[in-house]
């Protein structure tokens, strides 16, 4: 089974403070206010989605900033910026080299930050080690999707046709060859005995563009994250043939069988997290650790996660970093099995 799942105290000297408080309350208050005014953050925060609009990164960044604003956990303005290109690789090159100490720019990512760094074709020299991992927020799963009027009703019917002629169907995704959507697209076929290098795969910048290609007849099948196609499924525009979760999902996906149910041992977990720059200041890092820890415990965040069709899976900075190290090893093994490692 292939799974990417296995991917702070200020103490007060109380008696002294009380003893001095009566005679110096004005001075103390003024000093506290002065310190507060020099604290982080003092500027607007940008959260980057390294893709076009409509995909999983974009939705995660917008949900993250929206709830931080609603709960007033961050007083400075929060904006989302889309920076597509190379399945996130173009932004990573800029971030690692030009924004390495920019405390006011965060970004969201998922397994591609590891995959892009390890794959052979179109790889990025930069990965999670060129960032400050702040937190894992959620997990999602892959989905194999066709148009609502497609002749394919289940996963095996697609795989049978691909097994007979690997070039017969055009698969598409919102990331470059060898990246996450590509792996989601070809993993079931690989597990079904099809040579993954023979499958025709077309990449787009973000899941939104891939869905547009599918609906426009420019692709037969797409592999993407389940949450990004939820509204299209609800509107009856697509059919989800399988999800890569260990068991069936709830809500709109309750009637969608897993790949494993259909005899295909293709499980793929998509985590999503928030990262800061590699040279992020200690003040900024601690601020975001505390702020995100508060965020994930709010009812507003829990409701947003449910609305988006994600699952809450929070890891703090230290645990997230350890997890990423483990994921790095697992992705390496997967890419080696597919002949796509650098």
Image (spheres, grey):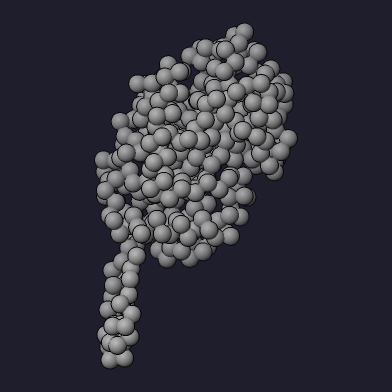
**Residue 18 image offset from top left, x and y in percent:** 33, 85
Q: Quadrant of the C terminus?
A: top left
Q: Is residue 146 visible?
A: no
Position of 163 with respect to 176 (left or right) is right
Residue 71 position (above or below residue 324): below
Total numbered labels: 0
Q: Residue at x 42, y 19 (%)?
A: 336
**Residue 66 image offset from top left, x and y in percent:** 51, 56
**Residue 261 image offset from top left, x and y in percent:** 68, 26
Q: Residue at x 43, y 59 (%)?
A: 291
Position of 304 with respect to 318 (left or right) is right
Q: Camera-side residue: 28 or 159?
A: 28
Q: Quadrant of the N terminus?
A: top right
Residue 218 position (above or below residue 105): above
Q: Residue at x 41, y 34 (%)?
A: 326
Q: Residue at x 29, y 45 (%)?
A: 278
Q: Quadrant of residue 283?
A: bottom left
**Residue 205 image offset from top left, x and y in percent:** 47, 33
Q: Camera-side residue: 39 or 152?
A: 39
Q: Quadrant of residue 32?
A: bottom left
Q: Is residue 119 visible?
A: yes
Position of 35 with respect to 287 (left or right) is left
């Amino acid at each position: 089974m292939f799974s990417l799942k296995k991917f702070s105290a200020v103490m007060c000297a109380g008696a002294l403070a009380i003893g001095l408080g009566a005679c110096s309350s004005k001075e103390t208050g003024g000093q506290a206010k002065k310190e507060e005014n020099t604290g982080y953050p003092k500027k607007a925060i940008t959260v980057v989605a390294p893709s076009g609009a409509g995909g999983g990164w974009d939705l995660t960044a917008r949900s993250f900033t929206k709830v931080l604003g609603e709960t007033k956990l961050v007083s400075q303005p929060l904006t989302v910026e889309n920076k597509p290109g190379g399945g996130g690789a173009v932004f990573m090159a800029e971030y690692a080299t030009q924004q390495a100490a920019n405390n006011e720019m965060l970004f969201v990512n998922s397994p591609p930050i590891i995959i892009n760094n390890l794959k052979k074709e179109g790889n990025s020299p930069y990965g999670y080690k060129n960032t400050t991992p702040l937190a894992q927020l959620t997990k999602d799963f892959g989905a194999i999707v066709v148009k609502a009027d497609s002749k394919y009703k289940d996963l095996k019917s697609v795989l049978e046709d691909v097994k007979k002629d690997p070039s017969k169907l055009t698969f598409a995704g919102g990331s470059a060859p060898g990246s996450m959507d590509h792996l989601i697209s070809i993993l079931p076929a690989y597990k079904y005995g099809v040579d993954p290098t023979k499958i025709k795969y077309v990449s787009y910048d973000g899941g939104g563009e891939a869905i547009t290609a599918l609906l426009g007849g420019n692709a037969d099948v797409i592999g993407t994250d389940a949450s990004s196609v939820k509204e299209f499924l609800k509107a009856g525009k697509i059919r989800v043939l399988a999800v890569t979760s260990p068991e069936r999902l709830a809500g709109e996906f309750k009637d969608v069988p897993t790949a494993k149910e259909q005899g295909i041992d293709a499980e793929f977990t998509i985590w999503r997290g928030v990262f800061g720059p590699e040279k992020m200041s200690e003040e900024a890092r601690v601020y975001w650790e505390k702020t995100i820890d508060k965020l994930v415990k709010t009812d507003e965040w829990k409701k947003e996660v449910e609305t988006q069709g994600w699952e809450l899976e929070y890891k703090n900075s230290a645990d997230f970093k350890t997890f990423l190290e483990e994921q790095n090893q697992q992705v390496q093994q997967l890419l080696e099995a597919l002949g796509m490692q650098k």
